[in-house]
Amino acid sequence: MLGELYANGHEVQPRRRLDLRYDTRTVRQLLGTRAGEHCWRASVGEGRPQSRPLRDALDWLAAHQNEDGHWDADAFGDECAKADQTACENPGLVSHDVAVTGLALIAMLGADQEQDMGYPFFEDEIDAGTNWLRHQQDPDTGLIGTKVGHEFLYNHALATLALCEAYYATKSPLLKRTCQNAVDYISRARNPFGVWRYEEPPNGMNDTSVTGWMILALKSAERAHLTIDSDSFESALLWLDEVTDERTGRVGYTDEGSRSSRIVGANEHFPAESGEALTAIGLTLRLRLGQTDRSANPILEKHGDLILRVLPEWQAIGFANDMYYWYHGTLAMREMGGAYWDKWAAPMRIALREGQRQDGHERGSWDPKGPWGFSGGRVYATALMALISEAVELKAQEVEIETALGGLGYL
Ligand SMILES: [Zn+2]
């Protein structure tokens, strides 16, 4: 059944989010021969189903979505009870429904990039989740969620990113004003000549972690042809320069080279030294904001080399897991490509496989073992790991297509 976003009298637009190299039709035209088509099918398949682990992850998310469309960070176990199952463990904090709903939606929308089917694969779930987020917006301010505590701008950034991705995918006019208002709120929350932290209006404090999500949301908005404050991008690059330790290549949290934050009594037993999340955020932002020339920007490889010194490793016992780092590291290394990607992706695949639950109602999800697992809970962990799985698979397809086209003399 088509939901509100897709019905509404508007023709569903074919989804064109794919890079040219992923586009089945374009590649077929490029290849243009039976041999070429055989090569294409052999290398990537057409409408190939998602890998079983990714599909299991998305199925777990779908099974734990509330009927009103949101994912409940702390009470998702209610969905297990409705299915006559023992409640899945590891709730997050009550204040993160908006953020985990945003992450789960981004994972579902991202998985659809692999389909090229014209319709979202989890269409009803995406539709319901998008509508729930849309209705969490304050019509006066544009803020999505409630202005409480230190997390509300994280929640808003993730919700804005998810809605902009959904708007780009569906072109639904219902989402345009919501997205623009959310983007305008982001602009008002930015420090003049600076970036973001916890306050709106801003109070002069900046940090790299919140800023990472804000820039990802603004880049998504830009792609969807929404109006953005383009000074944000220049300010973000200036901020990265300010907090980058050029000697080590480490990007700092609130000042030069400082480590990721930890909260006493909550997650200080996860050593900040076991991840380079901020460096990964910095590298991704630099690349996405146009600093792609490695000879002109030698700091790129310094960031990359530092990240490769702390590779992903799933620890069932221990405190080195850091999905937040792994997600941003995967984004960064995917864009670096080549040997950087190969060195990162191999252990990342192993960590994905070793951590994914195969038993009970938790099957398909990941235990939220890591510094921010107490906060986001199982929905957060599973959405992030699903997003990592998608990036790993899409990059593998990209490499296969490049190899196939290269072998036929097209690259
Ligand atoms: Zn469950």
Image (cartoon, rainbow, N blue to C red):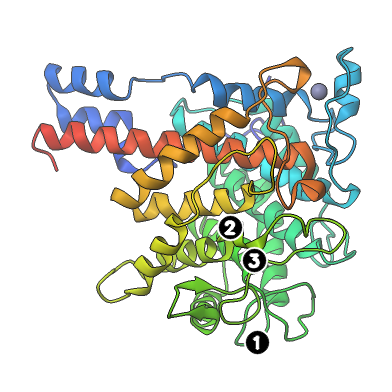
Instruction: Determine the image quadrant of residue 10.
Output: top right
Q: Residue 409: horizontal and vertical position, in percent?
A: 8, 37
Q: CA distance from mark 3 to mark 1?
A: 18 Å
Q: Residue 164: horizontal and vertical position, in percent?
A: 61, 52
- Residue at 28% over, 69% down: 293
- Residue 209 badge: 3
Give the label, 3 or 1, closer to the camera.
Answer: 3
Question: Which amino acid, by three-letter code, is at mark 3?
Answer: Ser
Q: Secondary structure at mark 1?
A: loop
Q: Residues within 10 Å of mark 1 (few under 14, many from 20)?
A: some
Q: Which residue is mark 1?
A: 192
Q: CA distance from mark 2 to mark 3?
A: 13 Å
Q: Residues within 10 Å of mark 3 (few under 14, many from 20)?
A: many
- The quarter of the picture where the N terminus appears is top right
Above or below, 234 against 62 in this view is: below
Above or below, 111 against 372 in this view is: above
Quick one: label 2 or label 3, which is nearer the N terminus? Answer: 3
- Residue 63 badge: none
Left or right: where does residue 385 sit relative to residue 369? left
- Residue at 53% over, 27% down: 119
Question: Which amino acid, by three-letter code, is at mark 2?
Answer: Gly
- Residue 275 badge: 2
Residue 12 makes an appearance in the image: no
